[in-house]
């Protein structure tokens, strides 16, 4: 018998996980609101080695907003970083911030969690009860961290590492290996280069197999793991890019120095985001291996470790969206002869990158 390929293993593992997972049979596409976050990688809080820490406030802000707006939270794996650090460090560091907001969803019974390859230990109920659950609630509510989640008949959610040679097959070896090398790497280069080192080929291969699984099984698959957000669109045009031309018109009419600087910065930011759409979001890079873009069936959430924010997917009363929460930050500019720090965004901004009719998409699958 021929050896199993990575594609075979990916298909097998997703099928297995789906059987062991949970199904939300009462899912109501017209009324329900769900938000999906993945690959938050909460670490020790150390600025050099924790890839998430710069987005802590943004994440809390976003969670609070989604809670108030009656969303159900789904965390799709690699929420804590258990390879690079001991998990207790992350639990302690984010106990009063992120876990506080997660707990609000959990106590309201609007909370689901899926495990990934970096927080694989949550597959064990004993560890969940002992370490994770007490951070979310003191009430007697069961917390089960799932291998997969299904919404209604057609929507399937998994972390996305299933069957991957690097992340699933040899995880015991790779865990020690990663902890050793990340510690050396962090000390030498800091976290930025580590993040950038996510191999594009590996990412592309993951996207390909996950998409093929979805296509073969006639499902809409939502995953994370690759750290590269991907939204398969029928239109291939983002629906709501902020209008640069209008901002430029406004800039021409503005006379105030400070207002000008803020507008310039805003335009630059949007231009950069547009570049991102071109390469990653609209999927131009990925279309080559997509046989049928008429039926979008694979959506990747992205991650919480970007330097400038966090991406997520919303399923909101019949719409599916890719959203980026842009972190607040300072800009430094010369005003006259002095270098001044100006606050550009004083609170995290929700940027809706693309939104489509979910029912129309599901009809085609
Ligand atoms: Mn992962």
Image (cartoon, rainbow, N blue to C red):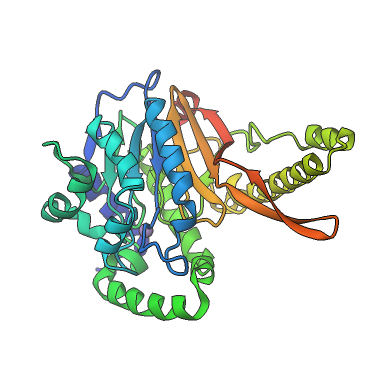
Residue under the point 64% across and 36% down: 238
Q: Quadrant of the N terminus?
A: bottom left
Image coords of residue 39 (percent x, y)? 40, 53
- Answer with left or right where residue 339 lies relative to residue 225: right
Along the line of sight, the residue nearer the viewer: 17 or 277: 277
Asked which quadrant contains residue 84, the reply is bottom left
Of the four image quadrants, the one with ligand 1 is bottom left
In this view of the protein, can residue 127 be seen by the observer?
yes
Number of callouts: 0
Q: Quadrant of the C terminus?
A: top left
Residue under the point 54% across and 42% down: 324
Along the line of sight, the residue nearer the viewer: 332 or 143: 332
Image coords of residue 25 (percent x, y)? 24, 27
Along the line of sight, the residue nearer the viewer: 148 or 52: 52
Residue under the point 30% across and 28% down: 152
Q: Residue furthest top?
A: 30
Image coords of residue 209 (percent x, y)? 41, 54
Residue under the point 15% across and 56% down: 127
- Answer with left or right where residue 226 lies relative to residue 331: left
Image coords of residue 9 (percent x, y)? 30, 59
In this view of the protein, can residue 300 be seen by the observer?
no
Is 222 drawn above or below residue 77 in the view shown? Answer: above
Asked which quadrant contains residue 264, the reply is top right
């Amino acid at each position: 018998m021929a050896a199993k390929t990575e594609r075979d293993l990916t298909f097998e593992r997703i099928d297995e996980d789906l059987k062991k997972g949970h199904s939300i049979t009462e899912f109501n596409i017209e009324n329900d609101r769900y938000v999906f976050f993945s690959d938050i990688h909460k670490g020790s809080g150390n600025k050099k080695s924790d890839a998430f820490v710069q987005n802590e406030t943004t994440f809390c802000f976003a969670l609070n907003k989604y809670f108030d707006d009656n969303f159900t939270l789904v965390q799709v794996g690699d929420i804590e970083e258990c390879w690079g650090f001991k998990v207790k460090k992350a639990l302690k560091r984010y106990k009063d911030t992120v876990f506080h907001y997660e707990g609000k969803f959990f106590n309201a019974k609007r909370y689901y969690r899926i495990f990934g390859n970096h927080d694989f230990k949550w597959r064990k109920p004993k560890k969940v009860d002992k370490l994770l659950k007490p951070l979310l609630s003191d009430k007697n509510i069961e917390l089960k961290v799932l291998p997969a989640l299904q919404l209604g008949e057609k929507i399937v959610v998994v972390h996305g590492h299933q069957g991957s040679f690097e992340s699933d097959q040899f995880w015991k070896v790779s865990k020690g290996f990663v902890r050793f090398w990340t510690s050396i790497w962090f000390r030498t280069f800091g976290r930025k280069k580590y993040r950038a080192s996510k191999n594009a080929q590996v990412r592309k291969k993951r996207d390909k197999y996950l998409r093929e699984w979805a296509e073969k099984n006639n499902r809409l698959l939502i995953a994370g793991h690759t750290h590269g957000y991907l939204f398969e669109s029928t239109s291939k045009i983002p629906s709501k890019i902020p209008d640069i031309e209008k901002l430029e018109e406004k800039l021409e009419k503005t006379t105030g120095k400070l207002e000008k600087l803020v507008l310039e910065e805003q335009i630059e930011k949007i231009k950069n985001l547009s570049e991102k759409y071109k390469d990653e979001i609209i999927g131009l890079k990925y279309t080559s291996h997509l046989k049928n873009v008429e039926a979008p069936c694979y959506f990747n959430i992205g991650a919480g470790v970007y330097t400038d924010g966090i991406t997520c997917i919303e399923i909101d009363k019949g719409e599916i969206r890719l959203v980026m929460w842009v972190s607040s930050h300072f800009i430094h500019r010369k005003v006259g002869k002095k270098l001044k720090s100006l606050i550009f965004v004083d609170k995290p901004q929700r940027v809706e990158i693309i939104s489509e009719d979910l029912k129309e998409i599901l009809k085609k699958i």
